[in-house]
Amino acid sequence: MYCSKIYCSLLLIFPLLISCSSGDHPEPDAAASESGLFSLVSSDSITPIYNGDIEAGDFDGDGDNDLIVSGLSATGPSSEIYLNDGTGKFIKSVNDLANVENSAVAVGDLDQDSDLDIVLLGVNDSAPVAHVYFNNGSGIFESGSASTIEPLAFPSVAIGDFDGNSTGDLVIAGYADSEYLVQVFLNDGFGQFSLVSVDTQSHPGQYRHSAQPGDIDHDGDLDIVALYYSAQYRYQLRMYKNNGVGGFTKEATRNVANGILSEGSSSFKLADFDNDNDADMVVVQNATSFRHWAGSSGVLVNDGGASFGELQHISLPTKSAFFCVSDVDQNQTLDLVAFGDFHYPASIYIGDYLPESRLVLNQRDADSMTISDGVIHGSAAGACTFADINGDGTEDLLVTGLSIDDSVPLPEESRRREAFHIYINNPG
């Protein structure tokens, strides 16, 4: 099974350890956070972005994880590749990638030459664009044919083997011409793609949507789950079952968490929460009004037949949210880090949102819920990924988005700044 986005093997069963952090605190140095799970280290060489994406992979074949970071920087749209020196320090690579915002990135070997290629979608000069970049093996990328891939606004993209031929296919979702599209592109093995139109939905407006691969019916192939904004102004889950060779059957549509996610844009991530080899999901409402500031977030557990149960509530950031998962504490279960804005109606920031983070550590055999002392800055409208960047065998956390700059006086909104944070994992 092939997929560049983490969607499997996440176990998220109560009791949980939850660490909460807002963006409104001084910048800690590495020593200040050594006592926790993470140490904050310098990321000065990396241009921070928001409204974008970040992915890690060994682009230059030297055995360590490099980065692609794409989105809106302080000076405009940006897409850059950063090569790792093996110790977690990054140097900007010379590559001619399209500078895009509202971007989505996927990384995988698309032409079967044993190196990692890149799919990059986003908006450039107010127009959606789509690019496939092929790696020469040393981290230098050349633009390949993406003529069959329709550029979409507010896109998502993931790589997975949908037709069982051990090559990286694509699932792309987004908005075009008043329609929300879910499309699969099957790979011929050499980086040439043919379109399989999975679904087209009349759409009331331009909102960010997402389609992700995962085995939702426990039959060993990759299905698709899409979250889209319906004409009834409800976010809904739509599931598409794979017949094993890249053909999809649309299953019944349901409102997320029985319709409680009703306004704004919502976010979700597929993962095997209960360790039964099918894809469950974590889901959050991104609130857009005061009366929805608390949001509705938590876990939807799959019963193995692509039927999701009642929402198991977890308090997560409610606006401009994003997630990443890894076994942070190395207890053989994957954990969750969630970022986004959280509303504080009783604080001095009345009517405003603060970027926050939630570290949810899965302790399957624990008897109680405790608070982690990890230090993670709040962030919103960004992206995160886990990757071992210093070669110690543990996955570190990389986050980019909008954080609070305490050196800037109130009002709160003007204190938001693009920020890139690197946290070295210290599970021992």
Image (tube, rainbow, N blue to C red):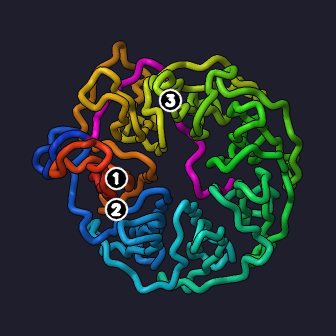
Residue 12 position (above or below residue 127): above
Q: Nearer the viewer, mark 2 or mark 3?
A: 3
Q: What residue is rendered at 48% in x and 66% in y? A: 70
Q: Please name the amino acid that badge 1 sits on.
A: Asp
C-alpha span from label 1 to label 2: 7 Å
- Give coordinates of residue 352: x percent, y percent: 36, 35
Q: Is residue 366 left or right of residue 174?
A: left
User: Do we see residue 54 in this rendering?
Assistant: yes
Name the residue at the left extreme: 31
Q: What SS does tag 2 mark? A: loop
Q: What SS does tag 1 mark? A: strand
Q: Nearer the viewer, mark 1 or mark 3?
A: 3
Q: Please name the amino acid that badge 3 sits on.
A: Ser
Return the residue at label 2.
389
C-alpha span from label 1 to label 3: 34 Å
Quarter of the figure with the C terminus:
top left
Q: What SS does tag 3 mark? A: loop
Give the extent of the magenta segment: 1-23
Q: What residue is rendered at 21% in x and 62% in y? A: 42
User: Is the C-beta separation of discs 2 and 3 under 8 Å?
Assistant: no
Q: Please name the amino acid that badge 2 sits on.
A: Ile
- Sequence order check: which comes first, mark 1 or mark 3? 3
Residue closer to the observer: 130 or 272: 130
Return the residue at label 3.
289
Disc 1 crowd, CA 10 A, few/some/many (<14, 14-19, 20+): many
